[in-house]
Amino acid sequence: MKRIIAAIASTVALSFASSASWAADLIETASTAATFKTFLSAAQASGVADQLKNSGPYTVFAPTDSAFKKLPPGTMDDLMKDKEKLAEVVTHHVVPGKIAVADVKPGKVKTVQGDEVTLTSDNGKVTVENANVIQSDVMADNGVIHEIDTVILPQK
């Protein structure tokens, strides 16, 4: 009987351990959506993806692919050649902590990049700087993603 109980306990422990390794981090969660290919590519190229996979929690205001297309011609090509600037742009969309839309407090918050961005919340409509949150509260194990319609460039 003790062997059976030990075998069951071992199986349950292995199940929990393996399910934890299958947890969806921010990068994995974003990659399940078809709208974040450019953001994910920028996060990978800049080296920020590892941070978004392995630490947190973070709130990511992730621009859609169409948001990146609104940038002036050549902007993304230039950024992809300058990994440091690219990392600044990506981390300018990331705020420490896990903030659901219902918990957004209007005002300035500091980004991982170091600058502040202004959040507003008006009857459920949330903006970050001049970008509208168009899909909110996409939960990951180490944070939350809010889809935005505009790329927010750092002031520096």
Image: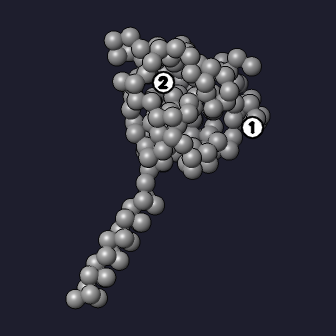
Residue at point 31% right, 76% down?
9
Residue 26, x across and y down, in percent: 49, 43
- Marks 1 & 2, CB-CB < 8 Å contact: no
Residue at mark 1 to residue at mark 2: CA–CA distance: 22 Å
Residue 55, x across and y down, in percent: 57, 46
Q: Secondary structure at mark 1?
A: helix
Is 75 on the left or on the right of 99, as rendered?
right
Residue reaching furthest to the front: 2
Q: Give the mark, 1 or 2, whose residue is nearer the N terminus.
A: 1
Residue 65 seen in the figure: no
For the residue pair 69 and 27, the one nearer the viewer reads as 27
Residue reaching furthest to the top: 122
Quarter of the image with the C terminus in it: top right
Residue type, mark 1 in image = Lys
Residue 106, x across and y down, in percent: 47, 14
Residue type, mark 2 in image = Ile
Badge 1: how crowded within 10 Å, few (<14), some, or many (20+)?
Answer: some
Residue at point 66% right, 22% down?
115
By what rule are the colours in the image chosen?
one colour
Say which quarter of the image contains residue 146. top left
Relative to 144, is 148 above or below? Answer: above
Residue linked to disc 1: 83
Q: Secondary structure at mark 2?
A: strand
Is 101 on the left or on the right of 81, as rendered?
left
What's the mark number on residue 148? Answer: 2
Relative to 3, is 99 above or below? Answer: above
Say which quarter of the image contains residue 38. top right
Instruction: Report the number of numbered marks.
Output: 2
Residue at point 40% right, 39% down?
139
What's the mark number on residue 105? Answer: none
Quarter of the image with the N terminus in it: bottom left
